[in-house]
Amino acid sequence: MYSMENIRNKVVIVTGASSGIGRALAVQLAVEGAKVVLAARNAVVIETSATELNALGYDSMAVQTDVTKEEDCRQLVEKTLEHYGCIDVLINNAGISMRALFEEVDLKVLHQLMDVNFWGCVKCCKYALPHILKQKGSIVGVSSIAGYKGLPARSGYSASKFAMQGFLEVIRSENRKKGLHVLIACPGFTASNIRIMALAKDGSQQGETPRNEGEMMAAEEVAARIIRAISKRKRSIIMTTDGILTVFLNKFFPAWVDKMVYNHMAKEADSPFK
């Protein structure tokens, strides 16, 4: 049975908390009574968010964190322990995307995707895991259908999400007798700035999103579903019908799904496919 009692008073770290799904998670967790640590590179934004939440009577703090830097990840955990004394949940949400054909992309783009999406998760988990195990708490990876099915023009993004999911499955398996909960959460296309910040083939920011943001799931809805899944200690959650069908059909008709995915991506505005 779903109950917010599983969230209330828990200490939750949210990476990538400055915007989009991360900010929505931080706000909703605080409203539900969690003690929230907002982590992101943009110190001004997360400090403002934490100040606003605390002024409303919620309990939060901000820790400037670049998840590509191991020392930042270590300090994030240490500062959380200094302030709250424990860690119950780590939500690895920090992430960036890309859109470019592999034959044209600069390899520095793939390195950057892996550094943020995969290594950022690994580094935060490395320092937080011992403390989460003490609480029999949760580790969450905000992934994507791209972690189940390679998406054309998203080589670095898909690779990083496949890697994240494989890593988290190992963490779950290794700690299966220690009470650790691991959730892999896969939103569909979400109305956020991840596509605006997505990298082009030369590493510059894409700028304009190629998709209609108004037709996408709101970040607040994604956050609500993730919080429910944490409370229920689910193993995984795929949040769209298209996503569920893609994962299911890919098991039996992978060549057909390759074609469907290609055609879908080719319809994007300014598609790299000719």
Image (cartoon, rainbow, N blue to C red):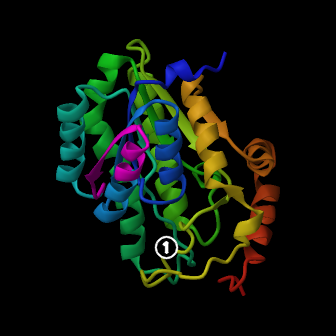
Q: Position of residue 159 (x, y in %)?
A: 50, 57
How crowded is the residue under tag 1: few (<14 C-alpha within 10 Å), some, or many (20+)? some
Q: Residue sitting at 57 percent across and 67 percent down?
A: 154
Q: Residue sitting at 64 percent across and 37 percent down?
A: 237
Q: Quadrant of residue 58?
A: top left
In this picture, residue 68 sits left or right of residue 236: left
Q: Residue sitting at 55 percent across and 75 percent down?
A: 196
Asked whether 43 or 222 is in front, the reply is 43
Chain part drawn in magenta: 50-67
For residue 55: magenta? yes
Relative vertical location of residue 271 with respect to residue 121 in this rendering, above or below: below
Q: Quadrant of residue 210?
A: bottom right
Q: Position of residue 142 (x, y in %)?
A: 52, 46
Asked whether 190 or 26 is in front, the reply is 26
Relative vertical location of residue 169 with respect to residue 122 in this rendering, above or below: above
Relative vertical location of residue 239 with respect to residue 266 in this rendering, above or below: above
Q: Dot 1 lies on which element? A: loop
